[in-house]
Amino acid sequence: MPTELAELVAAAQAGDRPAFDELVKATYADAYTLAFRLTGNEEDARDVVQDAYLRAYKGVKRFRGDAQFSTWLYRIVANCASTHLAKRSRTRSEPLDEDAPLIDERPEIDPELRADAALQRDQVTAALGELPAKLRAVIVLRDIYDLPHEAIADELGISEAAAKVRLHRARRKLRERLLPMRGEEEARAV
Amino acid sequence: MPSDLIDCDEVASALPQIVDGSGHADRAVLTHVESCLRCQAELVQYRKLLRALHNLRTEVLEPAPGTLSGILANLEAAGERGAIRSLLTGRRAAYLGGIAVATAAAGAAGALVLAHRSRERMRLAG
């Protein structure tokens, strides 16, 4: 953790509110990025980071410093996003079928061309956004933010085994969508 | 497909687990991959995918307008609520403390009156 951030954390733990505000300013874009990746839209991402910083503020004294502050914050964001999405799914109907295929109808994405090219960030981001929220959460936290399986399971309120199953399913879906093997495209088209 | 006991479909379902070395790699799966070009190619695709995902880690999105001010306003409101709560808690404690002192004083006064009456009664009887 950079010294400046560590000093801000220490000051915030001692009850210094302006120090916590500075901590927010230094980290909120990163926290927002994670919230956006987990929720898939700006409005939810904004709600999630607001909740997350409120929880972080109330719990900052419990941060022990044995992990990075950012990792601690990511876990809070993940937990808030999970709660938020669970509430949302009770009030809105959205497809949660984890086995539904990801369909990309944009003609500019040619499977032959993209197979060997380096994957573009916007392609990956778009494909992530099309994953069901439950699968997206796990792959984002594990493969982008490098959180351990145990932490992911804790924050999402699922077992470690379930977290792994979702991760593998998410990887497979993304691979099929972004880097299809010969025959998979034809199978999807049929 | 190589002539072994496991086919490409079975291996395909194991590839997302073994691509980062975190999942248990069954010996039969590894043996199959070593000799199957199709499965090797698929494993390479998974590695590409993981690299692409890992690269997203450095990307920081521009937060929606009003995000920072919303967070800070929320914290401010929570701070004020906390201050009011602690003030009310302090007042409640002082109020309860006052009642306790008044009750104790009334009890002590009552006891003194009773003791005094009792002594009077004994004096008159004696």
Image (cartoon, coloured by chain):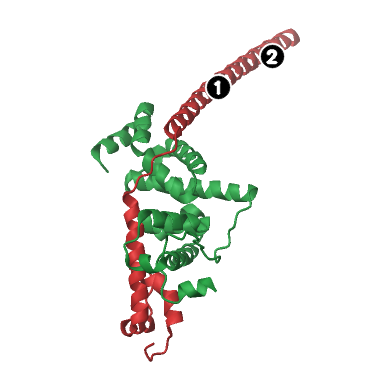
Chain colours: A green, B red
Q: Nearer the viewer, residue B94 or A80?
A: A80
Residue at the (37%, 32%) spot, across then down: A20
Quick one: which residue is furthest to the bottom in this view? Answer: B3
Q: Nearer the viewer, residue B6 or B119?
A: B6
Q: What SS does tag 2 mark? A: helix
- Give residue B88's quadrant in the image: top right
Name the residue carrying label 1: B88
Mark 2 or 1: the one toward you: 1
Q: Is residue A154 visible?
A: yes
Q: Tell me the distance, in whole angstroms, between the alpha carbons under discs 2 and 1.
A: 38 Å
Instruction: Give me the disc on residue B3.
Output: none
**Looking at the image, is B70 positioned above or below residue B60?**
above
Identify which amino acid the numbered label 2 is placed on: Leu
Residue at the (45%, 46%) spot, across then down: A36
Q: Nearer the viewer, residue B50 or A115?
A: A115
Q: Dot 1, crowdedness within 10 Å: few (<14), some or many (≥20)?
A: few
Q: Is residue B22 visible?
A: no
**Looking at the image, is A169 positioned above or below residue B121?**
below
Q: Chain of mark 1?
A: B
Identify which amino acid the numbered label 1 is placed on: Leu
Q: What SS does tag 1 mark? A: helix
- Could you tell me residue A188's position as x and y percent? 51, 71
**Looking at the image, is A84 positioned above or below residue B84?**
below
Residue at the (37%, 72%) spot, across then down: B18
Residue at the (59%, 47%) spot, across then down: A88
**Quadrant assignment for the C terminus of chain A:** bottom right
Name the residue carrying label 2: B114
Q: Dot 2, crowdedness within 10 Å: few (<14), some or many (≥20)?
A: few
